Image: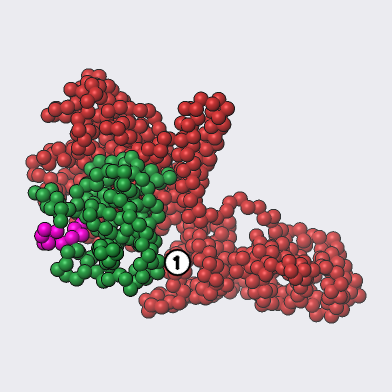
Amino acid sequence: MNAETITKINSYLSFNLGDEEFAVNVSKVLNILEMLKITKVPKSPEYMKGVINLRGTVLPIIDTRIKFGMTPTEYTNNTCIVVMEIEMDNDIVQIGALVDSVQAVLELEDSEIQPPPSIGSKYKSEFIYGMVKVDEKFIMLLDMEKVFSAEDVIMVKEKAAEGEGKIEDKEKSKKK
Amino acid sequence: MDKFRNKFIEEATDNINDLEDALLLIENNPEDKELIERIFRAMHSLKGGGAMFGFNTLSEFTHHLETLYDLVREGKYKITKRLLDVTLASVDHMKTLLANDDLDSADLRTKHTELSLQIRKLIDNDNDEKQKVVTEKPQKDQSKVKSYYIYFEPDSDIFSDGTNPLFLLDELYTLGECKVFAHFNKVPEIEEIDITKCYTYWEILLATSEDVNAITDVFIFVEDQCKLEINEIADYDIIQNIEVINQISKIAEEKTDVGVSEIQKIIKKFSSSKKQSVSLDEMIKMKGPLPSVKENVISSIRVSSKKLDQLMNLVSELVTTQARLSLYAEQSADSELLTIVEDVQKLSRQLRDNAFDIVLVPVETMLTRFQRLVRDLSKELNKDIVFVAEGAETELDKTIIESLTDPLLHILRNCIDHGIESPEIRSKLGKPTQGKIILKAFYSGTNVHIQIHDDGAGIDPEKIRNKAIQKGIIKKDATLSKKEILDLVFLSGFSTAENVTDVSGRGVGMDVVKRKLSEIRGVVELESEINDGTTLTIKLPLTLSIIDGLLVKIANSFYIIPLSVVGKIYATDHENVVNKYNNLIVLDGEQFPFYYLREEFDLPEGEQESEQVIVVSYEDRKIGIVVDEVVGESQAVLKSLGKMYKNQEIISGATILGDGTVALVMDTNKIISKFSQDKFNS
């Protein structure tokens, strides 16, 4: 699905990773599942949590937090698997993304969406195609295709920023 | 229209393949009438279909070829090597035309004119030769105009593949004078009319000097889709006889159809006065030898591979669901439910076997391309090579066949280029000048083996060794067994050809072959004796989608080990497998290297006292794999882990167990080679 179709549907599913709120266009979202038993695949990257059985198909599960350079997801009652359909190398692939909690479905007009932050800001614009301010909070609209087709862990936040809150502090301390 | 075009392209590809196949066969049996017919038929379908779907260049081009083979068919032209060369080149050209009918590149146009010219030459050439033989014959034919009665009733769905019956009538007009009576009595009431259906049928009187074959040829590619009757009704032109025609038209208007006997009666009535009567007996005699149109019995149907894939998926899901049902029934202890479940199990197993059978394709389907390659390439390299296939009826999953063709072509290229020597060298060595490449396919347990053997020069292990040292692949003082040396050929960047030709020897050869084959879980083995030849054996699984496996447990996760590699299972004490430096274990007095999978998978050490050692075969060795627990045998419907796990080598897929949990299918070969490497490097 390309950017044009995305903008035609104005609903976004917002979810939390730590204290940050992100959103994806609902056209990408197939399903929201409660936590299930995940079968770990040996010798795979840390952010690849394993696979689950989704009605007879094998669905890979990705720990979105690790993928974004945060600490691994701690399973709580709110932890969810968001099943998404993304395009990878011209193929439609289904993946399950672990998120800390699912928030709401937001109806956003195109006019409300601000362009991705420019250079020097707190977030990498590559994976974010827009931002929106809801109740004094910024929600980042993610480009899932880019996020999940990128190999390895990506840094949604620029590393250079300092004192950006505890997530980043944790992340840094973990790195050392 | 595009849909029809695509269908035509599909059919035309079949026809071209059939044509190529027949051409290669006829090379050895130039007298085989049936083959000539087959060639002719394929050409005719291509010509007709091509014209109908706008492949005019293709149609025209094929027309010339057809003219040529018409002569062959009539025995006026002998099958020669030159003729076959030109035809095979033309067949290749036809393939291009099918993809590119507009000839939009200059190269194509040149090739097209060149080939057309060659065909023309062959036809003309032949005309000179045959003139003496058959000069009288055509003249005789011309004076002999006969009348035919044709009953043509197309099937109501004849439009669905784009056939326009009117074009066929037009074609009849080109043969001679025609009188057509169209019947509309089968056209339903207006509200019931389905505009995609054909309700009209025709009776045609045709006066022509052509023989009955020419008429049947008009209908050749609708013959399965219509009722067709062709009868000779008079040995002169009845259309000139106005009285007869008037009478017939009158009946045609009044009655539904006239019928051949009615027409014959009329002709008899009118022609008796003209002393041209043909007795009814003679009529019947004439009718006898005419080709009767066979009943349309469908022995096979064409199904898109997409539908088959879907069927396979559904069957796989059924097997999974059925396993769940069995589990549930066992737990519920309801005897009635248990019997039903048993029936369902039996049925789903049969359904599964059937569905797998459907997607199996014989090895034979690949052979034409191989024949062709051997023929063309050996000629180009001035070698005399014969290609023999054994066990061509051996069947494999169609996806395997698809991914097998390219590697095999490459292997054959190697055989022809490097394997088989030139005739001079061969005779010096006391070998027959004609080289031989044998492709042998056979079943071996749950595997299919494909062997390619050539009786050529063989591979010199010393040469390979030197080359490997030179390329820095192995150390100078490395001691390797002959097999290990031969296996070096499969490493990337390795090519032993002394001079690179355009055929092979680009150094991307055998490693690609090996990789491609391992993608379909195939294993390659190479054996070679200097001057005796080389044998390459490919071992393939029968199908990719279901395997028999051994279900094991490691740290609460389920894994499947393909049963085909499992030898024996031993229980051993925990201490025997941990903290060993040499990773060797003695079982039944035999020593095995082993891998403790908990350790290799970076899992915490197990706490149980007894461990299970599964002895699996790896190449020609036996290696132990240590797991926590062996659960039992299990049939695994293989599911891919998907793109996200594309770098995951040691797990070849996953399967869903009866209770819904996911079990991972191990690729023991990859596991062993990966972990032995890791060990070696550290």
Q: Nearer the viewer, residue B170 or B611?
A: B611
Q: Residue at x 83, y 72 (%)?
A: B252
**To which chain does the residue with label 1 belong?**
B
Q: Main secondary structure of the magenta part?
A: loop
Relative to B447, say whether B246 is above or below: below
Classed neighbour count for the residue bearing mark 1: other residues with Cα under 10 Å, few (<14), some (14–19), many (≥20): some
Q: In the figure, residue B188 lies in which quadrant?
A: bottom right
The amino acid marked with disc number 1 is: Lys
The relative height of residue B223 versus residue A99 in the rendered view (above or below) is below
Element carrying mark 1:
helix
What residue lies at 55% left-to-right and 29% top-to-bottom?
Answer: B337
- From this viewpoint, is residue B14 visible? yes
From what the image shows, is residue B634 above or below residue B400?
above
**Chain B drawing hue:** red
| Residue A159 falls inside the magenta stretch | yes
Provide the residue designation for mark 1.
B95
Q: Position of residue B29 (x, y in %)?
A: 51, 55
**In this orientation, which residue lies closer to the viewer: B475 or A167?**
A167
Residue A140 part of the magenta-drawn span? no
Residue at 78% in and 74% down: B181
Residue B631's x, y, as percent? 35, 28
Q: Name chain A's colour.
A: green
Span colored in magenta:
A154-164
Residue B291 x, y percent position in the rendering: 70, 60
Looking at the picture, how far across and down is residue B650, in whole percent? 27, 42
Tell me: B36 left or right of B411: right
| Relative side of B67 to A21, left or right | right
